């Protein structure tokens, strides 16, 4: 899966200093509180020069700060052509439905535009079955055009009467095997003959993940 990167190099400290200037505050701990981040998470982001774009967009929306100015010292509003707003859908959904776009989004996220594409569906993870790779509350971007199974890769899979799950997928001629990264969760398998619409059980391959560490 792809790690999220800025579409252009930006300096964490420079942006944080602009936040301080805009809000007339002095300390990093005050910025962390504004962004809804713990001190340790903020410090780690600073160490890695990893700009928290989603948190900054939310701050700009709430406080009326120019997003373009905050990131690049230019612009007049919170929107930027470098970013796209992506709807997030819940994983759960028992029944036969397979088109997740027919559901109402539960949230949205702002990401660099290269992480948004026509075949994308963004899914909210609930539960610990894929930890430590994917944590509870993470958002996973799934490419619905990439349904070719490569053993051991992570996919969104539609299980009849359970709904969508995120698992590592393995396949043989007679069954599909779903494995969690968390060893506390059992491996499950389904005979191909049990799956009425077998060609559509794979929703798509996981392309990226956004999560707090």
Image (cartoon, rainbow, N blue to C red):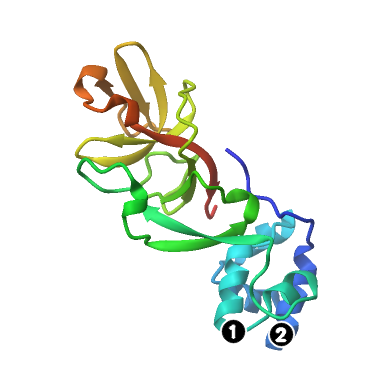
Give the percent coordinates (x, y) of residue 191.
24, 18
Residue 27 in the image: above or below residue 147: below
**Residue furthest to the bottom:** 24
Residue 206 in the image: above or below residue 187: below
Quarter that holds the N terminus: top right
Residue 200 in the image: above or below residue 126: above
Q: CB atoms at circles 1 and 2 under 8 Å apart?
A: yes
Residue in the picture at 71% in, 85% down: 22
In what element is the residue under mark 1? Answer: helix
The residue at which mark 2 appears reads as: 22
The residue at which mark 1 appears reads as: 63
Task: State the separation of the CA atoms marked 1 and 2.
Answer: 9 Å
Residue in the picture at 71% in, 55% down: 6
Q: Nearer the viewer, residue 79 or 212?
A: 79
Residue 17 in the image: above or below residue 24: above
Give the percent coordinates (x, y) of residue 196.
21, 26
In what element is the residue under mark 2? Answer: helix
Q: Nearer the viewer, residue 199 or 43?
A: 199
Q: Nearer the viewer, residue 54 or 44?
A: 54
User: Which numbered disc flags the more N-terminal residue, 1 or 2?
Assistant: 2
The answer to whether residue 80 shows anywhere in this view is yes
Horizontal relation, residue 62 to residue 12: left or right: left
């Amino acid at each position: 899966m792809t790690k999220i990167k800025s579409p252009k190099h930006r300096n964490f400290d420079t942006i944080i200093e602009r936040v301080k200037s805009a809000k007339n505050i002095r300390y990093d701990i005050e910025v962390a509180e504004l962004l809804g981040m713990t001190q340790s998470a903020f410090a780690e982001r600073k160490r890695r020069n990893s700009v928290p774009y989603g948190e900054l967009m939310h701050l700009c929306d709430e406080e009326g700060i120019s997003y373009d100015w905050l990131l690049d010292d230019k612009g007049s509003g919170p929107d930027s052509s470098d970013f796209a707003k992506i709807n997030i859908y819940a994983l759960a959904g028992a029944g036969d439905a397979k088109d997740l776009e027919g559901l109402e989004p539960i949230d949205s996220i702002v990401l660099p535009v290269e992480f948004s594409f026509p075949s994308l569906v963004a899914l909210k993870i609930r539960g610990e079955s894929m930890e430590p790779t994917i944590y509870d509350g993470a958002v996973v971007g799934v490419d619905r055009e990439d349904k070719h199974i490569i053993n051991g890769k992570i996919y969104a899979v539609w299980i009849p009467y359970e709904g969508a799950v995120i698992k590592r997928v393995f396949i043989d001629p007679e069954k599909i095997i779903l494995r969690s990264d968390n060893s506390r969760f059992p491996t499950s398998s389904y005979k191909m003959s049990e799956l009425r619409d077998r060609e559509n059980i794979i929703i798509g391959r996981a392309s990226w993940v956004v999560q707090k560490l």
